[in-house]
Image (spheres, grey):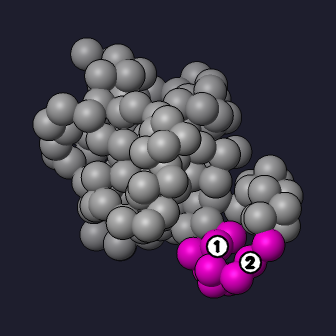
Amino acid sequence: MTIADYIDQHTGRLCACCAEKEAKEPNAKTANLVFFKMAAVGEPKAEELRELVKKYESPYGPIDLFDGNEHSYLEIGGLFGDQGLALRIMGLGHILGLWQLLTPRSILGPNLPADLEERMAGVGYITIKAQRP
């Protein structure tokens, strides 16, 4: 199974009603990726995702999302060839506890204006950071 297949099988975008409910009652199986909110679907496993990420061979360069450095969706999207896939990988990995998801709002607080959050996200300020091994 490819990483894209795994992500397609184990992630889904939240509809507007579910996203509104999620804002009021946060759920550990969802992630807010600024551009969209997503949920884990089925029974994804952290070790399965870790292995798929580690074995992925990008034609654009090496990839190590577990090195303890921050990696933006722009960087990850470049390596996987798809920013949407990158965001979903980031969200699922966060849900599974593989890394911390960092967004403008998670860093600057809940009072960050939505338009500023979207502008910051648009220039790459959605990142992940795994604990160093």
For marks 2 and 1, give the CA distance. 6 Å
- Near mark 2 (Cα within 10 A), the count class, few <14, some 14-19 or many ≥20, is few
What residue is at 42 percent from the left and 55 percent from the top?
Answer: 21
What residue is at 19 percent from the left and 38 percent from the top?
Answer: 44
Residue 105 is labelled as 1
Which SS class for mark 2? loop
With respect to residue 41, does 118 lie above or below?
A: below
What segment carries the magenta color? 104-113
Residue 25 position, x and y percent, is 36, 66
Q: Nearer the viewer, residue 84 or 35?
A: 35
What residue is at 64 percent from the left and 73 percent from the top?
Answer: 105
- Taking the magenta stretch, the answer to whether it contains residue 106 is yes
Location of residue 43 by image quarter: top left
Q: Earlier in the sequence, mark 2 or mark 1?
A: 1
* Horizontal side of residue 5 vs 105, given as left or right: left
Residue 45 position, x and y percent, is 16, 42
Q: Quadrant of the N terminus?
A: top left
